[in-house]
Amino acid sequence: MRLSGREVSCVRGGREVFSRLSFEASSGDALAVVGPNGSGKTSLLRLIAGVLAPAGGSIALEGGDGELTLSEQSHYLGHRDALKPALSVAENLNFWRDFLGGTPSDPAENLAAVELDHAAQLPAAFLSAGQRRRLSIARLLAVRRPVWLLDEPTNALDTAGQKLFADLMADHLSRGGLIIAATHTPLGVPTRTLRIGDAP
């Protein structure tokens, strides 16, 4: 499986964010997208996820499921945690499992993998910032998809949480998945780097 972008350009609000950007990541690869604030790291992830349309160029996934779009084979984990505060931890995860479709895995195992099984019945509103991030990470496990698009994924995680997430990323890569992450900090797994230039 190979995810590639060719001569990709992004325009937001009439402003060119970046232009003629090319990249490539294959099964087992982690690609760290780095650059100053405002240089387009998040925009690039949103283009790959299909949330935004490129102003030029192309993005394609080769070797995935030919009957599914790239967005249907991707998880996009934004820098904000998409949780419903009134729902319990388990209910939040079940919502995402049902919404995403596909072949789900065991929610109890997913919560245990991020060390939140003890809080399964707790309303998400009571979680700390680090725990909210762990619950968002559990969503990556709820329905397996080969492409993980991660925006500042280690935000709010303490050292133990970063190590736990690094182990989950390493497992995902070992299964043939790929990761593209916008980040200011090391991911804890071997990465290649895609640098986006200074903001205009």
Image (tube, grey):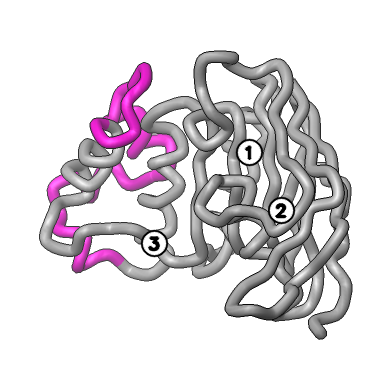
Q: Residue visible at 63% across and 46% down?
A: 48
Q: Earlier in the sequence, mark 3 or mark 2?
A: 3
Neighbour tally class for label 2: few under 14, some 14-19, many 20 plus, Cα within 10 Å:
many
Which residue does the numbered mark 2 point to in the structure image?
A: 187
What number is the disc on residue 81?
3
Residue 39 magenta-drawn?
no
Gap between marks 2 and 1 measured at Cα:
9 Å
User: Which of these two is toward me, 75 or 159?
Assistant: 75
Depicted 143 relative to depicted 57: above or below: above
Mark 2 vs 1: CB contact within 8 A: yes
Q: Residue visible at 15% across and 51% down?
A: 88
Give the amino acid at mark 1. Answer: Met
Left or right: 36 in relation to 91? right
Which residue does the numbered mark 1 point to in the structure image?
A: 169
Which element is circle 3 on? loop
Q: Residue visible at 64% across and 45% down?
A: 166
Neighbour tally class for label 1: few under 14, some 14-19, many 20 plus, Cα within 10 Å:
many
Percent position (x, y) of residue 77? 50, 52
Disc 1 vs disc 3: which is toward the camera?
3
Gap between marks 1 and 3 measured at Cα:
18 Å
Left or right: 198 in relation to 115? right
Percent position (x, y) of residue 121? 13, 47
Percent position (x, y) of residue 14? 64, 79
| Quadrant where the C terminus is found in the figure | bottom right
User: Which of these two is toward me, 97 or 174?
Assistant: 97
Which element is circle 2 on? loop
Mark 3 vs 2: CB contact within 8 A: no
Q: Residue visible at 70% across and 46% down?
A: 180
* Residue range of the region highlighted in magenta in the rendering: 98-127
Residue 120 magenta-drawn?
yes
Give the amino acid at mark 2. Answer: Leu
Give the amino acid at mark 3. Answer: Asp
